[in-house]
């Protein structure tokens, strides 16, 4: 980690631009190692339920001091069975990218699919921006060649 931070400081000192600019460097990707992380979570059970709905109609007839009513009603009950609590597991794809930074610094970059894109990078040279322990790697996507920035985190050396 100390070597990585020293490399970042050296790149910032050599780079040009304002303090808000992220240093841009060329990195060489050697290999990507794909893995998955198992994530287990609990789903609570639900109690049994029943719901009854009734529809009805009636007619009332009054003669003198006497009233007569007749009618009918239909009721339907819907029952839902209880479900037991359970534990589900999902697999989350991860990538560990082995990269060589300027000054021959060997760095492992890590990303995980989820709320953002994570890609296994092919061997080759890429442009990257450094922001603390985060490295944004510019990757051409699809046939259009449009550049996408993918967020990786510094995960040590190799």
Image (spheres, grey):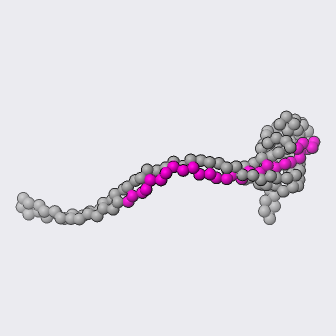
Q: Quadrant of residue 143?
A: bottom right
Position of 81 with respect to 115 (left or right) is left
Quarter of the rendering containing residue 10 = top right
Q: Quadrant of residue 56?
A: bottom left
Q: In the depicted view, which residue is nearer to us: 32 or 83? A: 83
Q: In the image, is 136 to the left or to the right of 104?
A: left
Give the residue furthest to the left. 64
Query: Magenta includes 87?
Result: yes
Which quarter of the rendering shows the N terminus? top right
Would residue 112 be visible to someone looking at this image?
Answer: yes
Q: Is residue 83 above or below residue 56?
A: above
Q: Which residues are drawn in magenta?
A: 78-106
44 and 69: which is toward the camera: 44
**Residue at x 59%, y 47% (from the top left corner):** 41
Q: Which residue is at a point 79% across and 42% down the rendered structure image?
A: 155
- Tell me which residue sits at (82%, 43%) in the image: 130
Visible residue check, residue 136: no
Residue visible at 82% across and 49% down in the picture: 97
Q: Is residue 58 above or below residue 124?
A: below
Q: Position of residue 152 (x, y in %)?
A: 77, 47
Q: Nearer the viewer, residue 83 or 59?
A: 83
Residue 62 colored in magenta in the image: no
Residue 4 drawn at (x, y percent): 85, 38
Q: How many marks?
A: 0
The quadrant of the rendering that contains the C terminus is top right
In the orientation shown, which residue stands out farthest toward the right? Answer: 103
| Prevalent SS, magenta region | strand
Q: What percent of the width, then of the height, locates residue 75?
A: 30, 62
Is residue 67 shown above or below 88?
A: below
Q: Nearer the viewer, residue 115 or 16?
A: 115
Q: Is residue 156 left or right of residue 68?
A: right
Q: Residue 123: percent from the left, percent from the top?
A: 87, 55
């Amino acid at each position: 980690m100390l070597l990585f931070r020293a490399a970042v400081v050296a790149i910032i000192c050599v780079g040009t631009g304002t303090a808000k600019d992220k240093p841009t460097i060329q990195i060489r990707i050697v290999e990507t190692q794909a893995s998955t992380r198992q994530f287990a979570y609990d789903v609570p059970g639900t109690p049994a339920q029943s719901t009854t709905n009734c529809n009805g109609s009636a007619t009332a007839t009054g003669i003198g001091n006497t009233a007569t009513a007749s009618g009918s009603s239909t009721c339907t009950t819907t029952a839902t069975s209880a479900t037991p609590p359970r534990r589900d597991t999902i697999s989350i794809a991860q990538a560990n990218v082995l990269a060589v930074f300027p000054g021959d610094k060997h760095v492992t970059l890590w990303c995980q699919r989820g709320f953002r894109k994570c890609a296994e990078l092919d061997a080759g040279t890429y442009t990257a921006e450094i922001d603390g322990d985060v490295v944004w790697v510019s990757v051409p996507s699809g046939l259009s060649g449009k550049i996408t920035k993918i967020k990786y985190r510094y995960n040590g050396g190799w």
